[in-house]
Amino acid sequence: MTARLAIIALPALAACAPQPSSNNVVANDALVAVEPPLPGTNQGLPDDRTPISEAAFTPDSAQGAANVVQTYFALLEERRYAEARRLWGDGGGAAEDFADAFLGYADYHAEIGAPGEIEGAAGSLYAEVPVAIYGRRTNGQEFRQRGAITLRRVNDVPGATEAQLRWHIERSSVEPRIGPQ
């Protein structure tokens, strides 16, 4: 009787096993994780071995701008697109369009480099943060790209709102390209 139950249960268990997708999307579990690009390579961050201070930083510093970039990519990696979108100065555009820009990615990761010096222009401050993104597209193809995220904040102008005084993403040179280019 026990052998008969095992024979009957095997086909039932096989029916519960994950089936291949018919929409040509590659399952993440079936592929090896993509390694980040090495520093100094074409798609990697600069091979700058200058230590970055681990001291506390203020939100309006260049490291405060880099922290916004770190948060942004952490939210993207977790597919929390609405929250990531709010880190853009214009809100990142329509919520659906923002999330749709990431539909072609099965995995999306980033390494964040040291921020550049803060520069000022017309009452605003700008900071550029290098990034190296990498991962896998939904078709299984690996991708790696190096670029920069430019952040902007108002330069303590009287009457500026709290939101204007915080760093927000102004533009990005990495895929997918969202916002003004």
Image (cartoon, rainbow, N blue to C red):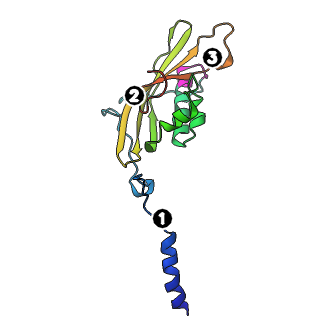
Work out whether residue 167 or residue 49 is closer to the camera in this orientation and state it.
167
Mark 1 and mark 3: Cα distance apart in space = 49 Å
Mark 1 and mark 2: Cα distance apart in space = 38 Å
**Element carrying mark 3:** helix
Q: Mark 1: few, some, or many residues within 10 Å (few <14, many ≥20)?
A: few
> Does residue 125 show up?
yes
Q: Mark 2: few, some, or many residues within 10 Å (few <14, many ≥20)?
A: some
Observer-side mark, 1 or 2, equals: 1
The N terminus appears in which quarter of the rendering?
bottom right
Q: Residue at x 48, y 73 (%)?
A: 14
> As displayed, is residue 92 above or below residue 16?
above
Q: Amino acid at mark 2?
A: Gly
**Element carrying mark 2:** strand
Residue under label 2, please give it: 147
In the rendered structure, which segment of residues is drawn in magenta? Answer: 58-65
The C terminus appears in which quarter of the rendering?
top left
Q: Residue furthest left?
A: 42
- Please tell me the numbered disc located at residue 164: 3
Q: Residue at x 42, y 53 (%)?
A: 23
- Please tell me the numbered disc located at residue 144: none
Q: Amino acid at mark 1?
A: Pro
Mark 2 and mark 3: Cα distance apart in space = 25 Å
Q: Earlier in the sequence, mark 1 or mark 2?
A: 1
- The spot of residue 4 in percent (x, y) is 52, 90
- Please tell me the numbered disc located at residue 18: 1
